[in-house]
Amino acid sequence: MNRRHLLLAPGAAALAAAFWIAAPSASHAQSGGQPIRVGEINSYTGLPAFTIPYRQGWQLAVEEVNAAGGLLGGRKLEVVSRDDAGKPDDAVRVAQELLSNEKVELLAGTYFSHVGLAVADFAARNKVPFVAAEPLTDAITWTKGNRYTFRLRPSTYMQAAMLVEEAAKLPAKRWATVAPNYEYGQSAVQWFRQLLSEKRPDVEFVAEQWPAQGKLEAGPTVQALAAAKPDAIFNVTFGADLAKFVREGEGRGLFRNRTVVSLLTGEPEYLDPMKDEAPEGWIVTGYPQEQIDTPEHKAFREAYAKRFNEPPRQGSVVGYATFKAIAAAVEKAGSTDAETVVDALSGLALSSPFGPITFRALDHQATMGAYVGKTTVKNGQGVMTGWRYADGADYLPSDEAVRKMRPE
């Protein structure tokens, strides 16, 4: 394999500016010419539980592409990565630096929805292809969608629709919600309320809690939810906020005789740290990696474990599939010309660890799905049980509805 370099920018923010490069071989000419450079942006210091596995996922994808001979007749795929510190302004600044100084030909990544939207706007203004890996807001492909931006993961609408399918079966009529007060949380709650109300006109939403992301005050939040006496709760918190919410809710009896429907909670990044304190019986979207035995997932899991000596997480799949998509688009385009690559991404079909996916030409949303099931504790660890794979293609609004939301 080629040499890899970890470069740190000077100053106190060295870690935030770290970037990894899959370096080309000594002789460009003999291996097909100059490398194809991709600028990658993410919140590595802000949410390492997700973004470090994500980085390992894209590193594996890049290594596989280069080991197989590279792209376009032997050109190596090279990644220049930057940390956005979870801030839209920082993300736009480093995107400009990547484009101007590092001469990247595509952009990829981002985690937080408001950061992803900022980079998507930058991509449109600068006419550079951007594959948004993680941000879940629907705006990135619908109300604020643009020609140059594509999104891999199932959106808040799609995952809310998957959970509503289960929530509508419950006898619960009185619902409460708790979500981080920024684009992702707001979008998730909006769609869950709308879609559940359409399926169950008899439900009512009796309470909402909107903690600042990363700053949840668990005691007052749990107390306010309990005071509303809901039959069920829709939760959108994640990371450290989720752990605090679960611990305080269990201690105060909030979840006793109440069903909780929860976005992302079944992902190992958020389930693993809670160990035997993981919630029991929550209906969640997630990733039961140790239980999925499809050929494509088994091959990915084995390759990932061999390379990093640990099992994959949701972020691992996202990083891996993002860069496999970029490689497939460049090969399909036959060049790195921005307009040609954008045309290639539109309608692009490829394999992923979750099975075949397509970036829809209509809105640039990929049809990657998610696993839906319940949480339980087994051998002192939270896991998913009774799960099924929900194909993203089955949880999208009609083409007519998308056209009304997405600008020309």
Image: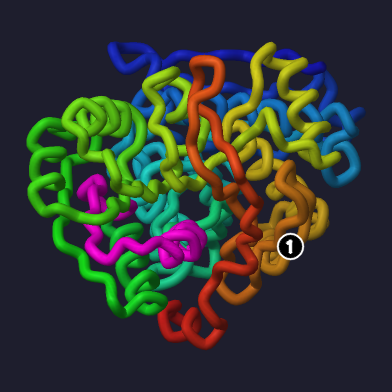
* Residue 101, visible in the rendered structure: no
Q: Nearer the viewer, residue 117 or 388?
A: 388
Give the quarter of the image for residue 156: bottom left
The colour scheme used here is rainbow
Q: Left of 293 or right of it: where is 159? A: left
Report the residue at 14% width, 57% height from top: 207
Report the residue at 37% width, 21% height from top: 277
Q: How many marks?
A: 1
Residue 252 x %, y %? 17, 31
Q: Which residues are magenta?
A: 158-184
Instruction: Tell me if residue 144 comes above or below residue 63 in the rendering.
Output: below
Residue 189 x %, y %? 30, 59
* Residue 209, visible in the rendered structure: yes
Instruction: Tell me if residue 26 comes above or below residue 116 in the rendering.
Output: above
Instruction: Tell me if residue 209 comes above or below residue 30 in the rendering.
Output: below
In the rendered image, residue 315 lying in the magenta stretch gets the answer: no
Element carrying mark 1:
loop
Q: Which residue is mark 1?
A: 348
Q: Nearer the viewer, residue 341 or 272?
A: 272
Instruction: Tell me if residue 395 comes above or below residue 211 in the rendering.
Output: below
Residue 96 x %, y %? 42, 44
Q: Left of 35 or right of it: where is 392? A: left
Q: What amino acid does circle 1 point to?
A: Leu
Report the residue at 35% width, 37% height from top: 238
Q: Left of 202 or right of it: where is 80? A: right
Quarter in which the N terminus is drawn: top right
Q: Nearer the viewer, residue 1 or 128?
A: 1
Disc 1: CA contacts within 10 A as few (<14), some (14-19) or many (>=20): many
Q: Nearer the viewer, residue 184 or 117?
A: 184
Residue 164 x %, y %? 44, 63
Report the residue at 41% width, 50% height from top: 116
In the rendered image, residue 162 lying in the magenta stretch gets the answer: yes
